[in-house]
Amino acid sequence: MCSVILRSSDGADHVVSQEAASLSKTVQSLLEELEAAKDGEESILIVPLPNVCDCTLRKVLQYCIQHTMSAQQVTEGPTPSDELKKREMEAWDRDYIMVSTDELYHLVMAAHYLNVPGLLELCCEGIANLIRGKSPEHVRQCFGLVKDFEAPEEESIRCTNLWALVDEKEQAKK
Amino acid sequence: MAQVTFSDVPLGVMEKIVCHLKGQDKASVRLVSKAARDACDNTTTFLTVRRSQWNGFPNLQRLINCTVVLFLDDMATLPSFRLDKYEQQTEGSFLLVCGEWWWKRADLRKWIGMQKESRISKVGLMLCITEQPRGNVDVCDMIEEVLDEGAPDLHYLGVWSQLLESVPLSDGLKWTRRIPKLDSLEGLYLEFVDLDMSALRSMQHLRELRLFFDEWDTSNIATFASMPELQTLFLEPARKDILEPSMLLGLGQNIRCLKVQGRMSSLAISEHPLWADFMPELFDTLTSLQRFEASANAKDLVKAVLSILDNNPAPQDVVIVSTWVVCHFKGLWVAVDRESNAFRGVFRSIDAAKSAMGPLAIPEGFVLLF
């Protein structure tokens, strides 16, 4: 199997199969460019990723490798036994995304930059899970956000949007 | 190490995050920051406006993707079962209005008028019966009363009932005659209304009809067949003996979606033990039919499908569609819930099964709440 080297922003190299690396569409297109430019040489391709640190890249590659392996195990078409594998993968994803808020931030930014759709979706779901049940102030604290509304603007949003955003089940309970 | 800040998360990513939120959580996020508010605005496709939170009309200019605005009264008894059952796809924007409190407000009518010129193209009314009618009451009188001079043109109408100790308040209502203002209706949803089907003959644009009934006239099927644009028919017979499956063979050739289920009785038509043999005949007869759905178990059909699944079918004969397992059976596709094995429907094609699964996933699609 063909391997490539992904180089993090802090200079750490990770050897990974081209298949796993190509889960990142950014890497895939960089590989295509490098492939075209290498002029028939047989040397291993090195992809520099200046926006991803070593620690985050490791975590991203853990995802890519696991999902590539899982995809290889699935036969030609989905069957009930493949469904079991799919559920196992979902459980793996749930464990994988149990990280600190800081890690989640770096991971979502990396998933966005590297364009790994599955990982990006997983990160977004993980962040949404952290938001649920929290007040605006609590969300700001959790995610290091700053309230950039003027007071009248905030009041206006509160007045004109609250009706649209009340959960029906919560309302029914009341 | 300083705490990271999510303020530089791109808007596209923020939108993906808020897509996982709804209700109060989305409200909280909207108040967090301008970027969060923008992400919420950009991803709002379905709004509910509640009477108790009424603070003015939604600014739809911000909510560019919003296709449905649902004005709800604060009726605590609004049954949750209504939420998932009615699906209506629209082209363009849509508006639903619930209850007379909203319907008769001059400011709402003015707002609808303004929206119709720009984004809102269709109007629906849910008429909820909250008081027990005395004797036999003609629902036509009630409808004509709410469709007064200044009322917007109506495309969808639902008449439904509050339940009092499981007894519908609208029991005893009759629909006896044509209502000219409803001739251009596209969707009609009725429960517990004793309907003279001939009164609907002038509704030549009716595309969707949903009826919950405990009495049935054998000529009803012929009336459905005479409606040229009727595509979706949702029948909820209160008892098994009201409607025989074979009657469905008399439906019109334009029917694309047929739903039959029991709500009050577990012995409604969808429990009838002949579906495995009947379904191919039904689809052969109704050439436009794309899907047949039912909430209860068609036991013989489920058994036949499980037997196929147990015998290692060819991969192309089994497709997973979200939480369903869809299996090729006698030229059709039968869906069962992958966890409970409950019957979910019969489809002419995999595409039809996919479109039936998860109405909110379809652009411009939404769950109609009646």
Image (spheres, rainbow, N blue to C red):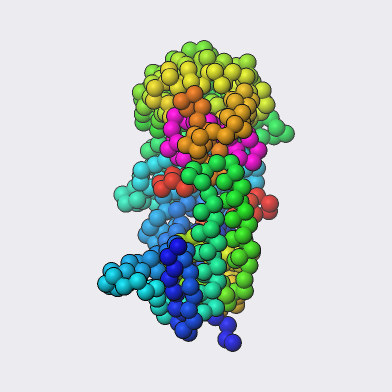
Specify the quadrant of the image occupied by residue B192.
top right
Q: Residue at x 55, y 68 (%)?
A: A62
Residue A162 image point, x, y percent = 54, 61
Q: Which residue is depicted at the point 38% across and 66% down?
A: A28
The residue nearer to you, when weighing B303 against B83, is B303
Is residue B345 located in the magenta-colored stretch of the structure?
yes
B271 is higher (above) or lower (below) than B313: above
Position of residue A53 relative to residue B140, above or below, is below
Residue that protrudes farthest toward the right in the picture: B165
**Residue displayed at 64% across by 41% down:** B339
Q: Position of residue A124 (x, y in %)?
A: 52, 64
Asked if residue B42 lies in the magenta stretch, the reply is no
Image location (x, y in percent) of residue B126: 51, 38
Residue B152, quarter of picture:
top left
Asked if residue B113 can be seen in this view, the reply is: no
The span shown in magenta is: B333-355
Q: How many marks?
A: 0
Vertical arrangement, residue B88 with respect to residue A157, above or below: above
Residue drawn 47% across and 37% down? B316
- The spot of residue B325 in percent (x, y) is 56, 38
Question: B167 or B32: which is nearer to us?
Answer: B32
Q: Quadrant of the N terminus of chain B?
A: bottom right
Considering depth in this image, is B108 or B31 the residue closer to the camera?
B31
Question: Residue farthest to the front?
Answer: A42
Residue most toward the bottom? B1
The answer, for residue B241, to whether it is visible in the render is yes
In the image, residue A66 sits, relative to residue B123, either above or below, namely: below
Would residue B237 be found to the left or right of residue A45 on screen? right
B158 or B364, nearer to the observer:
B364
